[in-house]
Amino acid sequence: MFWRLTGSDEESRPVCATWLLSVSHRLLSGMAEAADRIQAAIRSGEQIAVYGDFDTDGVTASALMYQALRALGARVTVIIPHRTRDGYGLNKTVPQKLLDAGVSLLITVDCGIANAREVADLISVGIDVIVTDHHTPPAELPGCILINPKLPGDPYPFKGLVGCAVAFKLSAALGAPLRGRDLLDLVGLARVADMGELVGENRVLVKVGLRALRESSRPGIVELCKAAGIDQQKLTATDIGFGLGPRLNAAGRIEHAELAYRLLLTQDHAEARQIARVLNDINRERQELTKLQTAQALREAEAAGKTRRSVIVLVGAYNPGIVGLIAGNLARQYHRPAIVLHLKGDGTAAGSARSIPEVNIVDLLREASPLLIRYGGYSAAAGMQLKVEHIPALEAQLNAAAGAAHEATLSIDAELRLSDITWALYDELQLLEPYGHGNPSPVFVAHDVRFMMVRPMGKTMSISAVW
């Protein structure tokens, strides 16, 4: 079966889904070398460690890599950092932890491309490193085996893969004795939850991933769907984006992402049910905290006149687990990039940025990189750390680089009459699924409509209108 893939930077071309899922990994630079090193480690019984991230992409990639390596008979352990204590990516405590555990090979998933210094420290103590990532590479790259479609000169034709998809391709290169759908449910979760553009190869991965999720017998998926009130057999990309993804992400935002990782790997339905309930409770706590601190951020931004600037930069006692959500709310409210930083207590601040389609936030941060201790991400979202004393200079430089603020616009796909809205039209629109970032739901406009009645129904409004 064929899907037509379209990307903003490449011509449309028909691509076989089977090829994408089974042999496309051969096009990624570093893949053959990585597979050889891992297979040698398995043959000699080396202790392998997988180092992930605390969001849904990182957790699913960690679970996928563990599942694939174990199926190959590897000795493997997984490390998922704590958002507040450890921060994003590798840190200076990792080498000693790995040495104490007897690890001789480290594989990163969904992180590592911005950790040149930390990778050098690991190599200096005799630990080999393979970095698999999808974030925009910085100027200084780690001196190890690298797998990232965004690397300069990498021949892979599609650059929008998420971290879990890169890990999936590594599992294919290793020849993990698993059926594709045993791992594609994780790829489908990651692809939608990480807000990647649903274009090109991503549409294939989401399409087959949704099918795998609907058919999945993985206890964590089954019980999480139940806890979220989602019909698993009718699961949609919207259900992942607003139901499953937020619950998995909530673990790393409020508690520890290991909860989500355990949920995805457990074979016990009772354990999965209990973890799913806990994640439900954590997600409700996350929702309330986000609501309160977003309101606080809106007040502070308005009071300081920052909403009239091209880039909003706020710093304060915000919960580090939700700064990205707050920044996203600010970006949507004022249609401009927003950065929300929290004070770490060591003279530095760390936080997250969210942007708008017109502004690549990583490009802006790259220009300001001398002011930053570290940064990383992609066009729509990024993270960073810097000294508190450099925040005013960062704000000034970002606003100067961003130029004039952009006006929010509403793109209308087509004009129609209310009489055009039929079940046949609905069926045709379903063919364009899955919808999401990069492939939004169509927006239509109807003129000369007179409202006959407006009445509240629950949290939504029911509107009756006539042509």
Image (tube, rainbow, N blue to C red):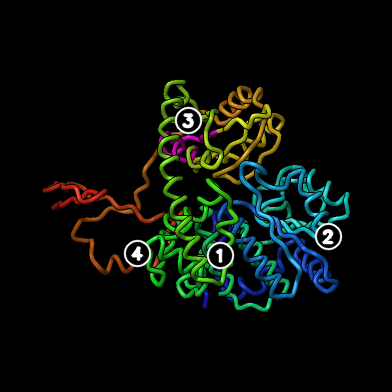
The reply to whether dot 3 and dot 4 touch (C-beta < 8 Å) is no
- Say whether residue 331 is magenta: yes
Q: Is residue 98 above or below residue 430?
A: above
Q: Give me the C-alpha separation between circle 2 and circle 1.
A: 26 Å
Q: Position of residue 455 (x, y in %)?
A: 16, 47
SS under mark 3? loop
Q: Give me the C-alpha separation between circle 2 and circle 4.
A: 51 Å
Mark number displayed over residue 429: 4
Of 303 and 393, which appears nearest the observer? Answer: 303
The reply to whether dot 2 and dot 4 touch (C-beta < 8 Å) is no
Q: Identify residue for label 1.
A: 264
SS under mark 4? helix
Quadrant assignment, res 74? bottom right
SS under mark 1? helix
Q: Give me the C-alpha separation between circle 3 and circle 4.
A: 34 Å
Q: Identify residue for label 2.
A: 104
- Say whether residue 277 is magenta: no
Among the two numbered marks 3 and 4 on one chain, the one whose residue lies closer to the N terminus? 3
Judged left or right of residue 20, residue 423 is left
Q: Give me the C-alpha separation between circle 3 and circle 1.
A: 42 Å
Q: Where is residue 95 in the image (x, y as percent from the top left)?
A: 80, 49
- Tag 4: residue type? Leu
**What are the residue bounds of the magenta stretch?**
327-340
Among the two numbered marks 1 and 4 on one chain, the one whose residue lies closer to the N terminus? 1
| Residue lying at 53% horizontally and 37% vertically, measured from the top left | 319
